[in-house]
Amino acid sequence: MVVPHHASGARLARHRLADELAELVAPTLLADLVAVLAELVGNAVRHARPLPGGVVRVAWRLCGAVDGPRIQLRVTDGGAGDGPRMRIADPDAADGRGLHIVAGLASRWGVDRDGLGQSVWAEFEPAGSSRPDLVAAG
């Protein structure tokens, strides 16, 4: 789906994800997916340029597995001068913790770049799988 490169884009993406996956995944996993998607879209709006048309592209893929679903979230924007990176946030800072939230909830996350922009993705393995460190490509 495409959403506006605006704060409302995160709300639209969260609601659509929740509606589409509510019957397919456990409520606790759905809450994690919604939180991570909100962070990724919010970061795209705050820190990156829009894609042509003033939008951000949002996608998710659900793959069935014997031990539970594997899910990937992907947010594509027009890129930024600096790619996404985890920061050390001052305890009183109002922001700077988003990618820590993503890393804490997802099994892994990373960034793919091409000539048109960047995609930040997060993957969720079935319950009980390990959570490897950040995987960044490109």
Image (cartoon, rainbow, N blue to C red):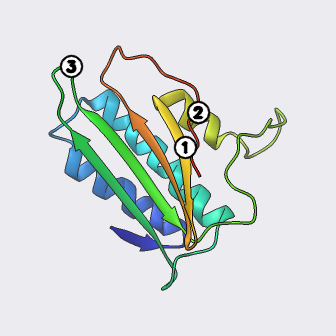
Q: Which residue is drawn at 15% across and 21% down?
A: 66
Q: Evaluate whether residue 5 shows in this view.
A: yes
Q: Residue 134 carries which label?
A: 2
CB within 8 Å, label 3 to label 2: no
* Disc 3 residue crowd, few under 14, some 14–19, many 20+, Cα 10 Å: few
Q: Residue at x 17, y 34 (%)?
A: 64
Q: Which residue is drawn at 46% across and 67% down?
A: 9
Choose the circle earlier in sequence order: 3 or 1.
3
Q: Mark 1 points at which residue?
A: 110
Q: Name the residue under label 3.
A: 67
Q: What residue type is labelled 1?
A: Gly
Circle 3 — which element?
A: loop
Q: Which amino acid does label 2 sit on?
A: Leu
CB within 8 Å, label 1 to label 2: yes
Residue 53's x, y, as percent? 48, 86
Residue 51's x, y, as percent? 52, 77
Circle 2 — which element?
A: loop
